[in-house]
Image: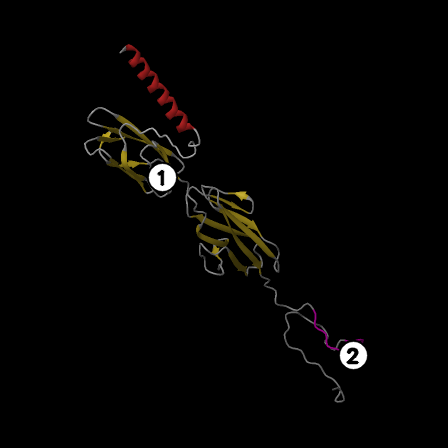
C-alpha cells in the first residue's frame, strides 16, 4: 500500500506539471488572468460626464471631465449583489449628488461596496470641472468723449470685424469699451491688458484710419480677436484753389479765390468753344 501511494502521488505531480507545461506552451496570447474584486458593482455612472476608461467591474479607478457649467454631478452605483451596501462619500446610498469645486478644480468621490459577508471594494472617481472655453464679448462700444459712435455692423458676439466713422475733426482719441462674456476671461486691447475692459486709443489726423484689436482669452486658454477700424473723417469740405484757363499755359480767369465763396463768374469771348 505504501508503494502504491507513492506511485499515485508521483503520477499526480507529473500530470500537474504536464498540464502547466501545456498551458504555458503556445497559449499565452489567448489566456488572460484578471483578479475579480471582492464586492463588484454592476454599473457606475456619473452625470454629466463619462467615465474614463469605460466602466468595468474589476476596474476601480476612473476619471471624469465635467463641463464648466456643472456645479455638481450625480453618482449612481448599482452593486452586483443586491444585498450589498453601497456608500458614496460616506453616505449609505446608491445615488447621490456631489458638489464640485470651481472650474479647473478636481473632486475625488469614493464609492464603497460591502457585502453581507464583510467583503469590501472601493471605487475611486476623480472629477475635473473643466475650465470655460468662452472667449466671447457680450458688448462692445466706441465713444469720442461722452458721445457714442456707431458700430458697423451692430455688435454680435460672433462677428469679429467692425468699422467706426468718427466725424469730429478735432477728435484725438476714442474710448473703446469691451465687456467679456465670461468674468474669468482676460482682455487685451492693442497689446495692453485691461481689467476694466476699457482703453483710450489715440487716432490719427482727419483722413487717416486706426486699427484697434481686442483679444479675449478664455479661462482654458482659447483666444478670439475682435477688430475695429476707426476712420477719422475730415470735416474740411473746402477747396484750397480753383482755376479756369483757356489753355494750360494761360492765365487763371478766376481772380481773388476765397474758399468761403461758392459762386464765380468768368467772361470769355464768343469764339471760345
Near-viewer residue (43 or 153) = 43
Does the magenta stretch mainly form a helix, a strand or a loop?
Answer: loop
Q: Which residue is mark 1?
A: 54
Residue 119 percent coordinates (x, y): 25, 25
Q: Which numbered circle lies on residue 241? A: none
Residue 73, image x, y percentages: 30, 39
Q: Is residue 224 left or right of residue 71?
A: right
Viewer-side label of 2, 1: 1
| Quadrant showing the N terminus | top left
Quarter residue 34 falls in? top left
Work out which quarter of the rendered image holds the C terminus and state it.
bottom right
Front residue of 107 and 215: 107
Q: Which residues are magenta?
A: 241-251
Residue 246 magenta-highlighted? yes
Q: Is residue 260 visible?
A: yes
The part of the image, by quadrant, that contains residue 100 is top left
Q: Relative to 242, say whether 215 is above or below.
A: above
- What residue did someone put label 2 on? 247
261, 177: nearer the viewer:
177
Q: Is residue 108 visible?
A: no
The residue closer to the viewer here, 232 or 161, is 161
Q: Are marks 2 and 1 in contact (CB under 8 Å)?
A: no
Residue at image coords 56%, 57%: 230
Q: Residue at x 52, y 58 (%)?
A: 164
Report x, y in % for residue 48.
32, 43
The percent position of residue 2, horizontal first and vertical second, equals: 28, 10
Mark 2 or mark 1: which comes first in sequence?
A: 1
Q: CA distance from mark 2 to mark 1?
A: 91 Å
Residue 110, above or below 180:
above
Amino acid at each position: 500500500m505504501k508503494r502504491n501511494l507513492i506511485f499515485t502521488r508521483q503520477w499526480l505531480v507529473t500530470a500537474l506539471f504536464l498540464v502547466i507545461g501545456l498551458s504555458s506552451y503556445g497559449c499565452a496570447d489567448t489566456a488572460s488572468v484578471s483578479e475579480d474584486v471582492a464586492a463588484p458593482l454592476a454599473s457606475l455612472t456619473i452625470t454629466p460626464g463619462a467615465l474614463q476608461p469605460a466602466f468595468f467591474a474589476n476596474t476601480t479607478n476612473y476619471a471624469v471631465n465635467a463641463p464648466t457649467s456643472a456645479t455638481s454631478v450625480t453618482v449612481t452605483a448599482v452593486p452586483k449583489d443586491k444585498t450589498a451596501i453601497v456608500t458614496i462619500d460616506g453616505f449609505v446610498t446608491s445615488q447621490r449628488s456631489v458638489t464640485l469645486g470651481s472650474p479647473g478644480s478636481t473632486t475625488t468621490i469614493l464609492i464603497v461596496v460591502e457585502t453581507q459577508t464583510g467583503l469590501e471594494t472601493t471605487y475611486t472617481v476623480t472629477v475635473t470641472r473643466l475650465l470655460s472655453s468662452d472667449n466671447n464679448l457680450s458688448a462692445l462700444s466706441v465713444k469720442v468723449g461722452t458721445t457714442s459712435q456707431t458700430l458697423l455692423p451692430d455688435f454680435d458676439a460672433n462677428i469679429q470685424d467692425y468699422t467706426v466713422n468718427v466725424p469730429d475733426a478735432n477728435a484725438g482719441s476714442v474710448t473703446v469699451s469691451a465687456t467679456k462674456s465670461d468674468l474669468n476671461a482676460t482682455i487685451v486691447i492693442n497689446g495692453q491688458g485691461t481689467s476694466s475692459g476699457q482703453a483710450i486709443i489715440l487716432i490719427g489726423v482727419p483722413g487717416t484710419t486706426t486699427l484697434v484689436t481686442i483679444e479675449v482669452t478664455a479661462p482654458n486658454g482659447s483666444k478670439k480677436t475682435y477688430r475695429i477700424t476707426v476712420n477719422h473723417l475730415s470735416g474740411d469740405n473746402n477747396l484750397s484753389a480753383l482755376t479756369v484757363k483757356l489753355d494750360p499755359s494761360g492765365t487763371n480767369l478766376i481772380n481773388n479765390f476765397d474758399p468761403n465763396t461758392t459762386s464765380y463768374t468768368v467772361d470769355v469771348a464768343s469764339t471760345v468753344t
